[in-house]
Image: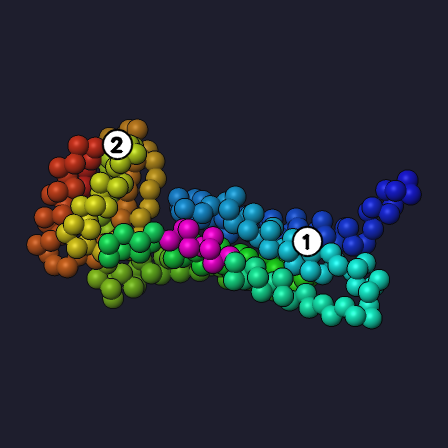
Amino acid sequence: MEFFNSFVNTDTVTIMVRLLFAAILGGIVGVEREYNKHPAGFRTHLLVCVGACLIMLLAMFGFQEYMEQNAEFVNFDPSRLAAYVVSGIGFLGAGTIIVQGVSVRGLTTAASIWVVAGIGLSIGVGMYFAGVFTTGIVILSLIFLNRVEDSFFKKKKGLEAVVIHATPQDTTLLSIINILEENQVKVKKVMVERDHSSEFENLLRYQIKVLYPNQDVKLTTIDKLYRLDQVHKVYSL
């Protein structure tokens, strides 16, 4: 009983609550990324948030005993570990960015990973309101601002969406992207989902936001896409 009481003390409960809270907030952001089939999804965002929270907790609680025993010559700054998280998370975010020809994809996911790390740090230090409020802003920007971009900025940028129903093979998306790149078509966003329509069963539906150089290139590109063996239907939105 004494061992249990010494283990479950105030600091232990605080650490457990903050880690669980970080997991929840990171998971919320990850659900949106997972739902839209992005490179880093639910588990990645959850783990990043929990890991950042753990590092912050380590800075806050991990060296207390050592500092108390060596108070006369120890000069410790907890923010140094947080700084390493902020700089180090860039390597993980870079792994979600795909550069192919003139197209760059995955920047939003990389940014969400970076923000999730910040959320984890804020929860680790006990700034619950900041973490929750930031999570709300991130979710609103990923879901609702994406719709604003579709309806408003699409016209400003001249973006169009090409929808492709194709057989789910390992090389399907690569073949599609290669054709777009060969024709100097800029790929802005790729969304993939299972095609549940009765007409095209067991197929994947690729919706790709692109920027065509001109109308002739658009027609030529769509024709080439339609000629792919694994493609069943191609149309523009």
Q: Is mark 1 in CB contact (under 8 Å) with mark 2? A: no
Residue at screen point 41% across, 46% down: 39
Seen as rendered, the residue at the extreme left is 216
In the image: residue 94, left or right of residue 174? right
Residue 135 appears in the picture as rendered: no
Of 132 and 171, the residue lying toward us: 171
Which of the labelled discs sits on residue 18, or is there none?
1
141 part of magenta stretch: no
Of 35 and 15, the residue lying toward us: 15
* Residue 85, picture quadrant: bottom right
Instruction: Tell me the crowding category of disc 2: few under 14, some 14 to 19, or many 20 or more residues within 10 angstroms, Cα based.
Output: some
* Residue 176, picture quadrant: top left
Q: Secondary structure at mark 2?
A: loop
Q: Position of residue 10 (x, y in %)?
A: 81, 54
Q: Position of residue 53 (x, y in %)?
A: 63, 55
Which of the labelled discs sits on residue 167, or is there none?
2
Magenta span covers which residues? 89-97
Of 45 and 215, the residue lying toward us: 45
In the image: residue 78, left or right of residue 150? right
Residue at screen point 75% across, 59% down: 63
Residue at screen point 77% across, 50% down: 12
Looking at the image, tell me whether mark 1 or mark 2 is earlier in sequence order.
Answer: 1
Which of the labelled discs sits on residue 94, or is there none?
none
* Residue 11, picture quadrant: bottom right
Q: Secondary structure at mark 1?
A: helix
Q: Which amino acid is tagged 2?
A: Thr
Q: Position of residue 226 (x, y in %)?
A: 15, 39
Residue at screen point 71% across, 49% down: 16
